[in-house]
Amino acid sequence: MHAVTVQVPLTEPVLGPEEEQAVLDVLRSGWLVQGARVAAFEERVAAYCGAAHAVATTSCTTALQLALEALALQPGDEVIMPSFTFVASANAIIHAGGIPRVVDVERDTWNIDPAKAEAAINRRTRAVLPVDQFGLAADLNAVSQIAQLHRLHVVEDAAPALGARINGKHVGAISEVTCFSFHPRKTITTAEGGMLVTDSERLAERARLMRSHAASASDLARHHAEDVLIEEYPEAGFNFRMSDVHAAIGLAQMDRLDALIARRRELAAAYDRAFAAVESVQVPGSHAGFLHTYQSYCIVLTDASPINRADAMRRLKEQGITTRRGCMAVHLEPYFVKRFGLTRLPEAERLAARTIALPLFPAMTDEQQSYVIDRVWELLH
């Protein structure tokens, strides 16, 4: 096969002179590790979401692990989560000492099915971990009601959902703890990084302590102390600190956030108009009052599709269009089958086998999108 010049990438971060200058300022300052810019980034994200506290981390995965660690999970404790998600959600539970209890997802939204989550609750259940798949908030109000009824914690994996809302209320101000990602595919990027937001001072303080080896004083506090300050380490923590370099990029990106989401939603609406009436595909669904950030735009090939997913992705690649599978069904991945046994979750399995993530990024031109739409139409008719 001849090499193909990629005409439309799957994604592309929006970075400009503002981000360049922000990084340069940090480099010239001589303070690169977690410091004043991390604190400013935390304040900015907390204020945007309407949360009391924010704790920056190296990734959403480590933010989730810190949140779960703060719950002091005991051996055998279970955390209910959807199967149709990235493995990071389950890995965070395992590394925090818990057992992921996977359940199926809703057919239209592809998010955790609250009824299935409630049915999975047993005496070992400690928390529910809903995932805001592709930037659409899970039914967080339903999940929160179930959690309150059964006295469970809620740790929300909102990796792609900074800026998502339910009836005008921001994700980050709904669940007990919410964790975001700043990977380049997300709504904003810091290259790599994550953030935990919560209204609980206790959880925030625990996360701040444990992200830096449980040190009793930070590097910045020791640097500014009037006298010699010797820190202590009362327990074993982690190195999950974000650097000021990453935070500086994040601060510049926050200025772009609402415009980036608006453009993503414009592109998603164009895809909806192109494919909503096509029998061979299912387009993303939603609940009334939910604002979707569209980290990714996925279609699901139905039984009426004239082509299977592997062949469709291969054909699109040959035409210079980059795609990815939507996501995996965690319960079918080899490690989880080996450790927890094989279960059957039909919706997660259907989506894992049939979803295709199409190119969508704020800098995508109308011409690029039209090219993608035309090529997909040719495959599905």
Image (tube, rainbow, N blue to C red):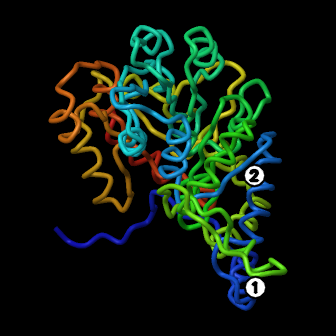
> Helix, strand, or loop for circle 1?
helix
Q: Is residue 229 above or below residue 54?
A: below
Nearest the eye: 45 or 281 = 45
**Which residue is at a point 43% across and 27% down the rendered structure image?**
79
Using residue 341 as the reference point, say whether residue 45 is left or right of it. Answer: right
Q: Position of residue 251 (x, y in %)?
A: 75, 65
- Quadrant where the image shows the N terminus: bottom left
Amino acid type, mark 1:
Asp
Q: Find residue 76 and report its image quarter.
A: top left
Q: Is residue 176 found left or right of 329 in the rendered image? A: right
Q: Amino acid at mark 2?
A: Val
Seen at 65% across and 62% down, the residue is: 216
Sort mark 2 into few (<14), some (14-19) or many (20+) by Cα contacts within 10 Å: many
Q: CA distance from mark 1 to mark 2?
A: 21 Å
Q: Which quadrant of the view contains residue 226?
A: bottom right
| Picture residue at 31% right of the left edge, 33% below the top | 329
Is residue 280 found left or right of 205 in the rendered image?
left
Residue under the image location 51 percent in, 55 percent down: 235
Task: Say if residue 184 shows up in the picture.
Answer: no
To which residue does mark 2 refer? 45
**Sequence-first tag of 1 and 2:** 1
Residue 25 is marked as: 1
